[in-house]
Amino acid sequence: MNRRTAAVTAAAALAGALLATAPAQADTGTASPTASATKEAKAPKSDGAKQICKRLPKTEARIDASLKRLNGDNTVAGSVARLEQRVADAKAAGHTEIYTYLNDRLTFRKSLVPTLQTRQDDLKSVASWCAAQGFGTDAK
C-alpha cells in the first residue's frame, strides 16, 4: 500500500507539472519572459560622460599601476620579464606542458602593454575634453 500511494503521488505531481507548463508553451501570442525583461530594462539616457570624467583619476591611476607592473623587472610579480623567466625555466627543465601554458600567458601579457598604452593616450584626450566641458572630478 505504501508503494502504491507513493506511485500515485508521483504520477499526480508529474501530471500537475505537465499541465502547469502546457498553457505557457501553447500560448504563442504573448511575449517570452526574456522579451518582457528586456522591455523593463531602461535604455541609457546619456553616454555617461559625467561619470567617466568623475572616475578619470582612478582610471588613470589603475592603468599607470598596471603598466608599471607589466614593465617591471623579473623581481616584480606580474611583470612580463618575470613571466619570461618562468617560461625559460620551464623550457630548460623540460616541462613541455608548463612551458606551453606559461608561454600562452606570456603572449597575452605582452599584448596588454600596447593596449594599455593606447588607453593611456586616449585618457589624455578625455581629460582635455572633460576640462573643456567643465566636467571635473567633482561632476555629478
Image (tube, helix red, strand yellow):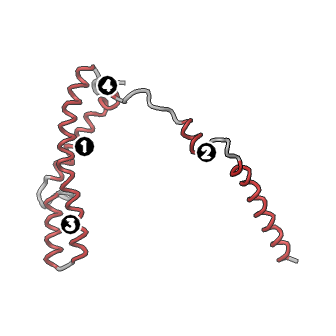
Which mark lies nearer to you, 2 or 1? 2
Q: Is mark 2 on a helix, strand or loop?
A: helix
Question: Earlier along the polypeptide chain: callout 4 or callout 1?
Answer: 1
Disc 2 marks a residue whose amino acid type is Pro
Q: Mark 4 points at which residue?
A: 138
Disc 1 marks a residue whose amino acid type is Arg
Question: Earlier along the polypeptide chain: callout 3 or callout 1?
Answer: 1
Disc 3 marks a residue whose amino acid type is Asn
Question: Earlier along the polypeptide chain: callout 4 or callout 2?
Answer: 2
Give the class, few, some or many, for how many residues have Cα within 10 Å of label 3's Cα (few <14, many ≥20).
Answer: some
- Residue at the outermost left position: 73
Relative to 62, is 78 above or below? below
Quarter placement of the N terminus: bottom right
Disc number for residue 62: 1
Q: Calculate the distance from the C-alpha at mark 2 to the C-alpha at mark 3.
A: 45 Å
* Residue 37 shown left or right of residue 46 in the figure: right
Q: Mark 3 points at which residue?
A: 103
Q: Nearer the viewer, residue 93 or 22?
A: 22
Relative to 65, is 75 above or below? below
Question: Earlier along the polypeptide chain: callout 2 or callout 3?
Answer: 2
Q: Nearer the viewer, residue 82 or 112?
A: 112
**Is the Cβ of the residue at disc 2 closer than 8 Å to that at disc 3?**
no
- Residue at the outermost bottom position: 94
* Residue 102 shown left or right of residue 85 in the figure: right
Q: Calculate the distance from the C-alpha at mark 4 to the C-alpha at mark 1.
A: 19 Å
